[in-house]
Image (cartoon, rainbow, N blue to C red):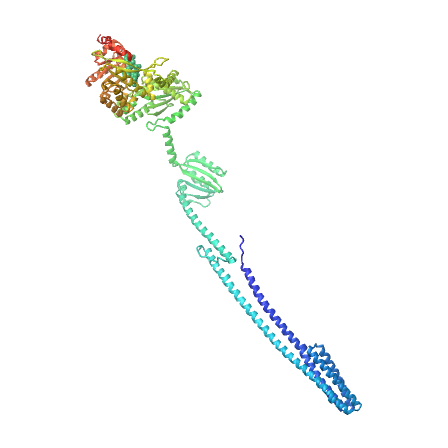
């Protein structure tokens, strides 16, 4: 919006114009009055005074004419007469001239009338005078005298009276002109005074207006502006809210300047504050910062930079160049020729406008990361001490690839290494992957404690490294699982040799926490590329071989074969069909009698599970039970077996018990107790008639909970038997853990008894112990009479084996009981 400005210039112009107008008007009036005065004066000098003069002359000439005419009448002297005549003639001429002059002066009407009347009277006089003279000349003296004295004189008197009247009129006019003249002079004097006063007043007003409206505000403003320029931005600027002229504009400009100045002041305070902060940040930041311009001149260098390179701030030179600083000072701190090279590289790169990033190793061992970045105004170089970080990273890297307990490589690195193995195998460099499991780690850990377990793992790691060649890599994959990657030209033979050496060295006793402990291992071996050409595959192959080695009875190694893999596949497919088979009622319980050695009577039947697929041969429980344990299906199977066994046993004589095998997995299920007691109730079987067979692994896995559950079942009246004694660790200490009702010595022990004196001694000890404890001791897997005899002499209370019967269908049991033949078998 355009603002209408009533400027001081325009106002001043108006004011001066007004003053000028006042002066002009005064002058015009004065001039007019003066002109009038002049006209009056002119009238007096050119008309009134000459007219009066002429009238006076005419009057004198008229009187002179009368005197002369009278003399003419009276004189007789010729000579005199002649002179008189001449004088009369001259007087008349003068009269004529005067009259002509008078009429040329321009007469007023009244004057004209008077003049005309004068002329008439004068004419009459002159004619009468002339007549009198003529009469005289004719000698009529009397008539002449009388005519002259009477008629002529009267006319002259009349004429003179008119002259007097005219002079009087002229005198009056003169007096009036004088009056008018004086009045006019006075008027012009007044006008001059008035216009002067007006002019004076105008100037005074103008002066005052200029003072109040211009000078004072300008003075105020100028002192305010001086304050502002002196930095006193809070000074009060005079307020002229309604002024839109130059003062208003200057005031607004001053206010705007004040606002800007205040803002600038605030801004400068903020900038100052920020600068202080930035300064604080720069000097306290943990990285060395050096900023330099396009010409490589150092603009800024913080404290950390100096500290990093042990520079003294006092040595800072003006206009010092970055490259020179690096070249001269920092280079001295660098360790080794390659770092020198990188310093040279930095200087070259900066000179050719390129960024730079590198880590320098200094003489004092510190690692400095150096980055130089181009900016619009030069360069920023950041020098950071990353020694701690590099150390930590190295540690993390070590931790990422090493097992913290044994210091061996870990599973992460194993996976990476396998990739390498496969790649190199494809290039013709064969390698074997050996996976190793300690056979007794869990029991050692449980019995001797975790510290001993850790110590065992550490000692195993040392032994493994000792036995391996320098090119072999030893890993701990987790728990008691180790792996070795072995390289050799004759990989098959050398892998076997190494495996044997490992087994041998691990079979040697360990001293853990002052105790001598034996801990053997099982090893699975797979060879790349012969057995597999993928990373996953080669590890899986070694694992399959390990699984096989464990199945072979541990303390041995197994080499991967495709047959093993097929078995595993078969196992997997078996697992897949197990549930289907169960729903199709392909499972069945059979019962094997257990005979009392004294009476030869059937004491109990052990319920053994059978899987007879409709269109295939029977699957061994030794195959499907572990599978069901692995996938958890054993809980369903176990419960079903218990119900089947109790349902069947309900029909047997009251003195014949039923033994049901319990998987360790089932003992992890807290509902087992309720299941057992409910089923006992359901089929009205006395708890004492139920015997639950557990293996010692139950006691290994989760001692407290399992033992508690078994104790509760025992309290219910159910009998607990320790099955397969002699296959596992066979520690007699287990017997103290639970109030067992029976120990079943494993078939392998019974078998070995005949050939191995150690086994015999152990069997005798077990039998003796069970007798002392007052519990039953059953010999399992007695196949023939010879063995039966040997058993009898060792004092077993019960016998179980093919010598009496294999497991039978429930329907066949009654017939079996009625048969007396089996008694005789014991007796004979
Ligand atoms: P186990 O508990 O030791 O069962 C005895 C095994 O020895 C049975 O094998 C039986 O047939 C076999 N046997 C008995 N007398 C002789 C003999 O004189 N000579 C030979 N060579 N073998 C004999 P089976 O039925 O094949 O069972 C194998 C294992 O499967 C059982 O060993 C047991 O651990 C498990 N098992 C069987 N049924 C069940 C069950 O219902 N539940 C659970 N958890 N495990 C079961
Ligand atoms: Ca059993
Ligand atoms: Ca057994």
Q: Which image quadrant for residue 73? A: bottom right
Relative image position of residue 91 (x, y in whole percent): 74, 84
Q: Which image quadrant for residue 67? A: bottom right
Residue closest to the far right: 138
Relative image position of residue 24 (x, y in whole percent): 59, 67
Is 730 or 251 nearer to us in this picture?
251
Numbered marks: total: 0
Q: Is residue 372 left or right of residue 185?
A: left
Q: Is residue 744 left or right of residue 122?
A: left
Q: Is residue 194 left or right of residue 338?
A: right
Q: Residue at x 19, y 18 (%)?
A: 772
Q: Is residue 162 visible?
A: yes
Q: Residue at x 65, y 74 (%)?
A: 39
State which quarter of the image contains the C terminus: top left
Relative image position of residue 191 (x, y in whole percent): 58, 71
Q: Which image quadrant for residue 683? A: top left
Q: Is residue 472 left or right of residue 25?
A: left
Relative image position of residue 807 (x, y in whole percent): 29, 13
Q: In this picture, is 723 found above or below 81?
A: above
Is 166 or 704 nearer to us in this picture?
166
Q: Is residue 725 visible?
A: no
């Amino acid at each position: 919006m355009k603002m209408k400005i009533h400027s001081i210039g325009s106002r001043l112009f108006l004011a001066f114009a007004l003053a000028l107008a006042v002066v002009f008007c005064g002058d015009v009036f004065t001039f007019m009055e003066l002109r009038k005065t002049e006209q009056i004066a002119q009238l007096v000098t050119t008309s009134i005074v000459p007219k009066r003069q002429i009238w006076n002359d005419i009057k004198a000439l008229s009187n002179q004419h009368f005197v002369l005419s009278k003399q003419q009448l009276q004189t007789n002297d010729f000579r005199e007469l002649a002179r008189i005549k001449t004088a009369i003639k001259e007087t008349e001429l003068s009269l004529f001239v005067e009259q002509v002059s008078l009429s040329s002066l321009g007469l007023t009407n009244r004057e004209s009338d008077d003049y005309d009347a004068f002329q008439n009277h004068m004419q009459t006089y002159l004619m009468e005078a002339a007549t009198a003279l003529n009469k005289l000349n004719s000698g009529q003296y009397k008539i002449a005298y009388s005519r002259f004295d009477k008629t002529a004189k009267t006319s002259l008197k009349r004429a003179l009276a008119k002259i007097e009247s005219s002079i009087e009129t002229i005198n009056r006019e003169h007096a009036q002109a004088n009056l008018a003249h004086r009045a006019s002079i006075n008027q012009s004097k007044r006008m001059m005074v008035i216009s002067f006063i007006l002019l004076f007043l105008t100037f005074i007003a103008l002066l005052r207006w200029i003072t109040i409206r211009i000078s004072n505000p300008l003075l105020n403003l100028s002192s305010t502006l001086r304050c502002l320029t002196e930095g006193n931005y809070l000074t009060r600027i005079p307020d002229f809210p309604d002024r839109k002229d130059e003062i208003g504009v200057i005031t607004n400009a001053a206010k705007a300047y004040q606002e800007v100045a205040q803002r600038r002041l605030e801004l400068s305070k903020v900038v100052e504050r920020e600068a202080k902060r930035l300064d604080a940040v720069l000097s306290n930041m943990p990285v060395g910062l050096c900023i330099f311009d396009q010409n490589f001149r150092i603009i800024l260098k913080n404290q950390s930079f100096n500290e990093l390179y042990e520079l003294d701030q006092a040595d800072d030179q003006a206009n010092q160049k970055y490259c020179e600083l690096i070249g001269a000072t920092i280079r001295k701190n660098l360790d080794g020729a390659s770092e020198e090279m990188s310093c040279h590289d930095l200087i070259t790169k900066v000179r050719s406008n390129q960024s730079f990033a590198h880590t320098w190793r200094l003489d004092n061992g510190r690692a400095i990361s150096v980055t130089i970045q181009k900016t619009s105004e030069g360069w920023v170089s950041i020098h950071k001490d990353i020694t701690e970080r590099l150390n930590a990273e190295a540690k993390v890297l070590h931790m990422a690839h090493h097992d913290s307990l044994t210091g061996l490589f870990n599973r992460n690195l194993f996976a990476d290494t396998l990739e390498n193995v496969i790649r190199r195998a494809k290039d013709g460099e064969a390698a074997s992957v050996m996976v190793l499991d300690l056979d007794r780690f869990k029991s050692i850990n449980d019995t001797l404690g975790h510290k001993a377990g850790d110590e065992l793992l550490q000692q195993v790691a040392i032994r493994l490294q000792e036995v391996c060649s320098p090119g072999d890599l030893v890993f701990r994959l987790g728990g008691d699982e180790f792996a070795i990657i072995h390289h050799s030209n004759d990989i098959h033979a050398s892998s076997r040799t190494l495996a044997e050496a490992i087994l041998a060295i691990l079979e040697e006793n360990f001293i853990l926490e002052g105790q001598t402990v034996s801990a053997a291992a099982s090893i699975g071996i797979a060879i790349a590329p012969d057995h597999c050409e993928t990373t996953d595959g080669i590890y899986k192959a070694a694992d399959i071989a390990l699984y096989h080695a464990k199945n072979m009875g541990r303390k041995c190694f197994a080499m991967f074969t495709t047959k093993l893999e097929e078995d595993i596949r078969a196992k997997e497919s078996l697992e897949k069909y197990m549930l289907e088979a169960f729903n199709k009622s392909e499972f069945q319980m059979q019962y094997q009698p257990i005979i009392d050695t004294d009476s030869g009577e059937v004491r109990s039947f052990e319920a053994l599970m059978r899987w007879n697929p409709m269109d295939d041969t029977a699957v061994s429980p030794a195959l499907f039970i572990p599978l069901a344990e692995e996938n958890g299906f054993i809980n369903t199977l176990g419960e079903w077996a218990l119900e089947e066994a109790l349902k069947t046993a309900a029909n047997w004589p009251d003195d014949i018990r039923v033994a049901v095998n319990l998987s360790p997995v089932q003992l992890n299920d807290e509902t087992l107790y309720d299941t057992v007691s409910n089923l006992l109730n359901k089929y009205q079987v006395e708890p004492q008639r139920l015997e639950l067979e557990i293996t010692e692994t139950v006691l290994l896995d989760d001692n407290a909970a399992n033992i508690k559950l078994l104790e509760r079942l025992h309290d219910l009246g159910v009998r607990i038997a320790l099955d397969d004694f002699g296959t596992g660790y066979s520690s007699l200490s287990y017997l103290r853990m639970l109030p067992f009702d029976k120990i079943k010595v494993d078939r392998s022990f019974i078998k070995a008894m005949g050939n191995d004196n150690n086994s015999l001694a152990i069997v005798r000890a077990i039998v003796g112990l069970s007798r002392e404890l007052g519990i039953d001791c059953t010999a399992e897997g007695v196949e023939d009479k010879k063995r039966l005899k040997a058993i009898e002499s060792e004092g077993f209370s019960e016998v179980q084996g093919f010598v009496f019967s294999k497991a039978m269908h429930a329907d066949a049991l009654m017939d079996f009981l009625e048969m007396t033949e089996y008694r005789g078998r014991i007796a004979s």
